[in-house]
Image (spheres, grey):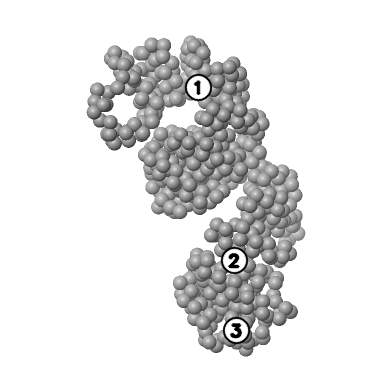
Amino acid sequence: MDVPKDQLHTLLDHGLFSSAQIMGCFAVSSTSIHPETSPHLKAESLVLFGDSLFRGKEFRRAIQVYRQALQYHKTLPKQSVNTTPTTRSTLSASNRSSSPNSSNTSAINENEVKFQIATCHSSLGDNRAALAEMEGIPSKSRNLEMNLMMAKLYRNSRHTRAAIGCFKECLRNCPYIFEAIIALAELGVSAKDIISLFPQTPSRSGRPPSDHFDSSRWLPRYVEAQCCIASNDYKGGLDLFTELLQRFPNNIHILLEMAKVKAVIGKNDEAILDFENVLSIDPYVVTYMDEYAMLLKLKSDNSKLNKLVHDLLNIDPTKPEVLVALAVLWEKKDERGALTYAEKSIRIDERHVAGYIMKGNLFLSLNRPEAAVIAFRGAQELRPDLRSYQGLVRSYLAVSKVKEALFAAREAMKAMPQSGKALKLVGDVHASHVTGREKAKKFYESALRLEPGFLGAALALAELHVMEGRNGDAVSLLQRYLKDWADDCLHVKLAEVFAATNMLQDALSHYQAALRINPQNEGAKKGLDRLEKQMKGIDPDAPEEDEDNEVDDGDGDQEEVELL
């Protein structure tokens, strides 16, 4: 053989893919290999060449070359075909050093080659072709990696039962496939059923393992935590994660899971602290950093948001989390540009929930509620949580589809019966029309009884009081909350109520208090500007003197967009 295949193996093993591709060209074109008399050698050379293309991410070329290898493989005698995937290599380990004088036996593993073809299709986003290729591998011949890919492909294709079966098979072979644990929890499999899949293997010495190494103590708790989160029992999940954190302090994965859950349920300050803790331990983490970016945007902490996005771009600009964080940063400057980043994050990972949430929020900002509904539904299909329900309710109310909004809100209430935020959603729908305000009041009050510290419900109830002309009740409610929570939004709402009742000095003090807490609060800035005009005797709604002369002032338009 003109080209020594062991050297080609060496190049691939050391990651020298460019050199391997060039050497592969020599291998497949060598005149010393006659396809008619030595099809096994031709197939082996093609597989090695295909591996070099695959590892160099030239997936379409790799598919073509792998298929050629399989064609030569089919010409071999049936009894010589090796179909058992004993090794991860696409070549049989026993044939790696075969010479031109070796017997005419198959040097490639047909199932592994098919798996490589499927992986190429998957990398190109063609899940249907990938699944068709994988289904050509007999179930008894699939290894752990193959079963995991099958499970993911079935899930992406919405073949839930088949996906569950493959994920379960993964855990029967190895209980530490955390992707399978999380997926099964999200697909509705109970913690008990998942734990029952774990193989019961005693230690080699025959003695029970020590407490330090005994994963049978903590792994079931991890499963229970993920199942709690998947079933919207956020409190139960956080309690279990907290318990695990005591045994594994500074565990970045657990801290990130807790931070994400707290962000979903609106415990924004706690979530921000958890994200900051993670970054202090490992400043190069990308996982869930788009969630952190959204929280910083809500807090109007632009300096931290800018630094976060800058750091993420330096780590890996191709990650979906980075693109969503970019969308968050660009939302204030250019909503359409931000939408482009959100859509790109979904193209990279079609299961990235934060991308759909961000996309839905941007469509609402662009006054495209119908498109927002589709985005929030996409998030719900992947993993329903409070934010997708909130987005759906807002979107339906924006197009006056009260019935659909009420259905979505009630879905949230059924999924999260112990959540005050779900109750508030139902209240929001009733508050959208005059005849439902009394019902809305009851739901807001129930939400506050369930979660006394839920400021969103307090603000909504205060707004309802104002709409009904009960300004005194609104002031009493908000002042009661101010005793325990120094929140800028509370001050802004109080200022608005005082301004509406012509108590301008009280309104002024609360706008100023809001800006002391959060200098970037746009509502406080805008309200203070109006109030100062009122106090000077100027109509705040009157047009500016030079407004008619500067209709095309682009900079002014941009400032208005940023203000809003």
Q: 23 and 487: which one is in front? A: 23
Q: Which mark is residue 459?
A: 1
How far separated are the C-alphas under marks 3 and 2? 22 Å
Tell me: 532 left or right of 435: left
Local SS, label 1: helix
Q: Amino acid at mark 2?
A: Ile
User: Can see residue 258?
Assistant: no
Q: Would you place residue 301 above or below residue 175 in this image?
A: above
| Residue 363 appears in the picture as rendered | yes
Residue identifier under label 3: 35
Mark 3 or mark 2, which has the lower sequence index? Answer: 3
Q: Nearer the viewer, mark 3 or mark 1?
A: 3
Q: Residue drawn at (36%, 34%), measured in percent from left and top? A: 562
Q: Are marks 3 and 1 in contact (CB under 8 Å)?
A: no
Q: Quadrant of residue 509?
A: top left
Residue 32 is situated, as x and y percent measured from the top left of the image, at 55, 88
User: Label 2 belongs to which residue?
Assistant: 117
Q: Residues within 10 Å of mark 3 (few under 14, many from 20)?
A: some
Q: CA distance from mark 3 to mark 1?
A: 78 Å
At x 47%, y 49%, the residue is 344
Q: Residue at x 29, y 16 (%)?
A: 538
* Secondary structure beneath label 2: helix
User: Marks 1 and 2, how far apart in space?
Assistant: 56 Å
Point out residue 492 in the picture as x, y percentages from the top left corner. Answer: 42, 22
Q: Position of residue 206 (x, y in %)?
A: 76, 59
Q: Is residue 167 above or below residue 15?
A: above
Identified at 57% across, 25% down, the residue is 429
Residue 41 vertical position relative to residue 507 in the rendered view, above or below: below
Does 124 sit left or right of 149 as displayed? left
Three-letter residue code for mark 3: Pro
In the rendered image, which quarter contains the N terminus? bottom right
* 1 or 2: tag closer to the N-terminus: 2
